[in-house]
Amino acid sequence: MAQPIDMFAPKVQVSSDGLEATMTFKLPDGKNDVPKFTAGQLLGFLQAANVSFGIDQEMLARLAESPIYGRPIKVAEGNAQQQGTPGYFEYHFDTSFNRKPTIRPDGTADYMSIKTIETVQEGDLIATYHPAVQGARGMSVRGQILEPKPVRDLPPLIGRGFNRSSDNLTYTAQIDGKIEVNQGKINVSPVHEVQGDVGIETGNIKFNGDVIIHGGVHDGAVIDAAGNVIIHGLIEDCEIHAGKDLFILAGVKGNEKTVIECQGTITAQFIEYAAINCAGNITADYFFKSHISCDGHIQLNGNNASIIGGYVSAVQGIEVNDIGNSFGTITNVAVGVDVERSAEFDMLAKKIEALNENVLKIKKGIEEFDRIGQERGVNYKEDPRRMQLLRVRIRDEAIVLEETKRLAKMKEVIVSGKFATIRVLRRLYAGSNVSVDDHHVSINENHESVEVSKTAEGVKLSRINQG
């Protein structure tokens, strides 16, 4: 008896994305004659599977003439949707910088590799906007329209120090200065730039922004900047105040006359005979006979990473190759929160408490004036005694606000030093004195690769496993 033709019908499959249809002919079983199908019949099988677009009629004709058994053959192909391109900004300046020195093959740190800011000149093209390009529809082999994902344009850049074209496509610098971009906001801010050295010839520098000095600083010069300070040459016999970060690419030879105050981080090739106070982290090659204090972490890099002589403290911890030297040079190193800082915190807290009590008393005094005035039907608001109380209250409330902010910052620093340690990767030499919080120990013999931490019993030296 003849077999139903449908039992030999090829299997039609459509890909998950709807862009391809295949036809698979069953392998002959040797028992039944396998019929040949006309191109029209094969087209019917496709239509029965709802395949109606992109059908390869030439392939159907070839399969009708010479079927290919046992493997899927592509017989229809759809058109993929073309995805669009969202609008984007092309920046014509560096937006990322190398703020740490690269380490040379010989293990030394290359501080001249540091790049901290990008500057532009008035009229420079700083950004170009490329508008969104919408995609194109596609079609599946089943005749379904394939929509591309919608893409959007970005709003114009905001910020200051630049001009924008009327079509919002090009942006140019309005002034000479430092340029930076953050979350779609561009700022071009003034920069004070000195091509050579700063000293007697140039005089002191005070600037409400960033300062870039391509030479060195010496001869007792004072630099006072509200922003970042970048110095390419050597620092000698000077005073520097940085409101943000400080980069000293050639190092400090302080001659015991250099004083540095920094509210951000400090990066320096080396520091010798200087007094430094830093609110952030410090990265350098080595310290020599300097007095250095920072509220962050100290990281010394390269083969020469060492602290020799002087006093160095960091609230959040220190990592260094060597502390001290083979000559037994007295070297004092401390981490965490010392007794003086804790006492300062307590004193400030008591000061705020006393001020708050005084403000409360003054408020009661003012209320008493108002109460008596109400009873007597007299307006005491212009009374000199009441006016004086009011002035003192306003003054003390302002002081409380500022001191409370300072107390919160001090608390933040104290908390950050809770688990501070000193990591000495090579050698802690005899003659060094190390402290963690209020615990101290003098080192009487050399120690190799140790971490100094605090326990309930005191200072503990633990071997560092560098394997």
Image: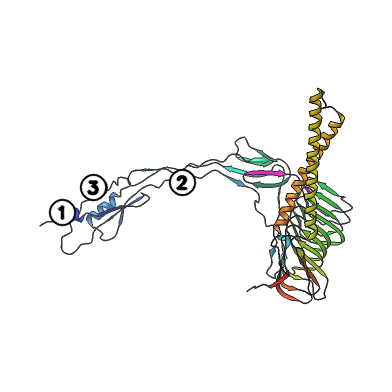
Q: Are marks 1 and 3 in contact (CB under 8 Å)?
A: no
Q: Which residue in the structure is indicated by mark 3?
A: 44
In the image, taking residue 79 as reference, residue 328 lies left or right, namely right
Residue 414, position as x, y percentages in the image: 73, 56
Which residue is depicted at the point 64% across and 43% down?
185
Q: Which mark is residue 4?
A: 1
Residue 314, position as x, y percentages in the image: 75, 61
Q: Residues within 10 Å of mark 3 (few under 14, many from 20)?
A: few
Which residue is depicted at the point 58% across and 39% down?
155
Q: Which label sits in the foreground, 2 or 1? A: 1
Quick one: SS at disc 3? helix
Residue furthest left in the image: 1
**Nearest to N terminus: mark 2 or mark 3:** 3
Q: Which mark is residue 83?
A: 2
Counting labels gives 3
Quarter of the view holding residue 102: bottom right
Quick one: SS at disc 2? loop
Q: What is the magenta range?
A: 182-203
Q: The C terminus lies in which quarter of the figure?
A: bottom right
The answer to if 195 sits in the magenta stretch is: yes
Residue 146, position as x, y percentages in the image: 39, 44
Q: How far is mark 1 from mark 3, CA to CA?
A: 16 Å
Quarter of the view holding residue 4: bottom left
**Nearest to N terminus: mark 2 or mark 1:** 1
Asked if residue 213 can be seen in this view, the reply is no
Asked if residue 342 can be seen in this view, the reply is yes
Q: Residues within 10 Å of mark 1 (few under 14, many from 20)?
A: few
Which residue is depicted at the point 74% across and 47% down?
405
Q: Amino acid at mark 2?
A: Gln
